[in-house]
Amino acid sequence: MRSFITRAGRKLKDLFGGDQEVETDSSPLAVSYVPREGVQEQIVQRLDGEKNLFHIAGEPGVGKTFLLDWVEDEFGDEYAVERVELGSHHSIQTVAQKIYRTILGDIPESVKEGDREITGISGSASAGGFGGGGGVSWTRNPPEWAEDRFQYIEALDQMADYIPDGHKRLICLDDVHNVDDDEKKIKDALSEIAEVLGPEVTLLSVGRLQFKGQVPVIRLSTFSEAQSVELLMNEVPEMETATARELHDRVSGHPYYLGLLADIEDPAAAIEVPEGDIRDYIEEEYLEALGGDEERFLQATSPLTELDEYVCSAVLADEDGFDQVGVRRLLRDLNKRVIVQDKRTGPDGTTRYAIHDKFREFLLRQESNPGEIHVAAFEFYTDQLRGQIASDETDFEQGTQSTTLCTHHLSALIELQEQQQSVAGFLERALGEDGLPFYTATVLLDELKAWPTDDVPETVVSTVLSTLEDREPLARYFFDEKVDRSWAEQLYDQEVFADPDIPHMQYLSSIIDVHPDFVVKVITNLDSEDPNTRRWLISIAGDLPADCSG
């Protein structure tokens, strides 16, 4: 096994070396990086081991993102490293699709194009001479796995043999807890993907999930006393060792709060704050220590899940005085602190940022009226999507990301009972026959599925149901065991289940174990003359639980 000291040496030299000219960065956890030799050693061992899947688990703010940065820097020469940010509403299928697209880029174009096949011969070529005035036409037969599709795990299995020998790929799946499914299914899916891909590809998932059993897990805990003291005294050299130890005890060694403490005016004053109030106190002091523009900007944009110069300048009121250039500068400055993290670079080269989860929760507790920001952000993202629909050039990645971000504000408007006509109009366009592509549209449907219809404005409910009538694939996706039953009750009241069509029959089949009483109600009140429908409903009646089958 390679020596961890050798592997880590370059990084630690970069972090602590005084000879190099480096950009000034005020983040305590970026400059005064406190190495976690034990955890880093485990990562080296996992990458040297036989298993090609492992997981880093930790609560918010313990340094998962910084550790992932270290992995990218440390192993970037040895592996082709791809970092995949997973957001809310991403499904297991999305994860597989993102891995698929990464691996597809590793396979030579000649393999993806497939073998050539003669499709026609013309002129003198048909007489046996290819040098004359005739010609030969060819077509390519690409392998099935090279065509983007929805059976991504099956495609990965088929394409694994074509990954070039010696090409080592490391895929880091960040914030895997955001995937919209239960922990066991996520773990099982990642295990299956890792197995089919083989040893040339390693998957590293990072997030709050614990993944007990089957998948090797590296657990990232809070700082030890020695690590806390090192960080605080590096950042605040005049601090006494005893003070640093006491502050460690007060925040239980939590790296996020230690990072904030190092930036407030009088860290030692936190010692006197009652235990139940100390975390709020630290965040409040930190916010007050920021410049006026920074504080106003963070307070105003806290309802946004992702920040860039375009959305921020669009949603902030004109009187706030934040134009695109000013916002870009603010985001870069805030990124040098512990509270704002750069998440990814979009297809247009724009860097996206996010307020640290814990600090954002604190800001939202201070925000009494986020409605205006939600309305403005909803309009911003729906304008983007309408433009893509109108141009018939929906970029898959950008369209899906814009839709994902839009759903957050869509739900907020539903909860606030605001902009009902605007929401309904957008859904009619997006879910309509010439609207968003299937996969992108399912992101919206996943959000709507979870809402009981009693909590959704009536005009929105009727728009969704009427639009799905004309787009059967989306109707089949929407009506499954995960959709809130109230949506089906709406259709039952409209007598749709008196003579159900294919999507609704499939729905009944999916809920036999979940809502057997609803299935019985439909069978009992069936009013269809179609023999196939009647025969099918009789067949599923036999699958009902024993206490319902009568």
Image (cartoon, rainbow, N blue to C red):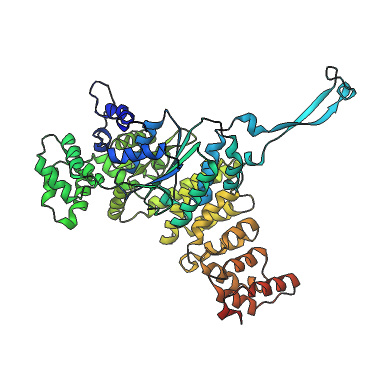
Viewed as shown, does residue 26 lie left or right of 397? Answer: left
- Nearer the observer, 464 or 341: 341
Q: Looking at the rendering, which quadrant does residue 137 occupy?
A: top right
Give how far across and how far down residue 187 sits, in percent: 46, 52
Q: Measured along the vertical axis of the image, is residue 462 above or below residue 347?
A: below
Give how far across and how far down residue 180 sits, in percent: 47, 54
Q: Measured along the vertical axis of the image, is residue 490 above or below residue 239?
A: below
* Numbered marks: total: 0
Viewed as shown, does residue 340 lie left or right of 519? Answer: left
- Nearer the observer, 405 or 500: 500
Q: Residue at x 60, y 48 (%)?
A: 151
- Nearer the observer, 164 or 393: 164
Give how far across and how far down residue 463 sits, in percent: 57, 61
Q: Measured along the vertical axis of the image, is residue 417 above or below residue 111?
A: below
Q: Furthest-top residue in view?
A: 131
* Quarter occupied by the C terminus: bottom right
Q: Residue at x 26, y 38 (%)?
A: 29
| Residue 530 appears in the picture as rendered | no
Viewed as shown, does residue 502 lie left or right of 190? Answer: right
Q: Residue at x 68, y 66 (%)?
A: 501
Give how far across and how far down residue 63 sits, in percent: 30, 43
Q: Looking at the rendering, which quadrant does residue 388 occupy?
A: top right
* Quarter occupied by the N terminus: top left
| Residue 75 appears in the picture as rendered | yes
Q: Residue at x 74, y 75 (%)?
A: 529
Q: Furthest-right residue in view?
A: 127
Q: Furthest-bottom residue in view?
A: 550
Q: Furthest-front residue in view?
A: 1
